[in-house]
Image (cartoon, rainbow, N blue to C red):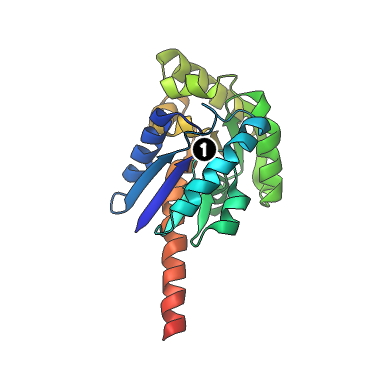
Amino acid sequence: MKLVYINPNATASMTRAIVAEARAALPDAEIIGVTNTDGPPAIEGPEDGERAVPGVLRHVRAAADADAIVIACFDDTGLDEARQVAPCPVLGIGQAAYQMASLMGARFCVVTSLAVSIPVIRANIEARGFSGGCAGVEASGLPVLTIDEASEETRGQLSDSIRRARADTGAQAVVLGCAGMAPLRADLQRRSGVTLIDGVAASAHLARAAADFLAGAATAAEG
């Protein structure tokens, strides 16, 4: 099983952290990380997303031997376009997180980085059919690259934002709305006492399920 994680931004440290989390979730899979060096350093709002899409699509086309591809930005940057050109399943970590919350039967809220990302996330939730399970989307006020640095101060602020979001929305679980939060999930869950859903780990499991399902369907058709 080969999964390719495409980071739409140009920050290689985030790609390495994302791949490490995906490998921890799915240790028996071959997991490759690709950094979109033509993208912005971080995806913060729709303009950054638009700038990243051409590079994302180049990497999607280059991953022709993958069993599944994951777009490793919570905004699901270029996801629809990628599905049009990929020969295999393509998931976004945002959609994977919402799907996992739905499978858990949990009403969720999202804690993301900056407020500029909220309209994109809300639009994605509505477009993918998850509005009924979403209690709200809130911003931590922390830039993506600050989250990636993962200082003690940043961890404390994120934990506070998570607790506040759950209290404000009444959600049963909080979705971590930034790829840079994925390596912090266990620590943030311990600090906050809140059930957290990480789209990187969720996408690894769902990507394998999608690839296995298609492989089984193809075998059945041949038989």
For disc 1, the neighbor class at 10 Å (few under 14, some 14 to 19, many from 20) is: many
Q: Does any portion of residue 100 appear in the rendered image? A: no
The one of 126 and 47 positioned closer to us in this rendering: 47
Residue 107 pos. (x, y %): 61, 43
Q: Does any portion of residue 142 appear in the rendered image? A: yes
The image quadrant of residue 139 is top right
Q: Quadrant of the C terminus?
A: bottom left
Q: Which residue is drawn at the image coordinates 47% and 61% (left, top)?
A: 210
Residue 106 pos. (x, y %): 57, 46
Q: Which residue is drawn at the image coordinates 56% and 22% (left, top)?
A: 161
Instruction: Give the amino acid at mark 1.
Output: Pro
Q: Which residue is mark 1?
A: 8
The one of 162 and 128 positioned closer to us in this rendering: 128
Q: Quadrant of the N terminus?
A: bottom left
Q: Which residue is drawn at the image coordinates 53% and 43% (left, top)?
A: 56
Q: Which residue is drawn at the image coordinates 54% and 48% (left, top)?
A: 57
Residue 73 pos. (x, y %): 53, 38
The image quadrant of residue 34 is top left
Mark 1 lies on a secondary structure that is loop
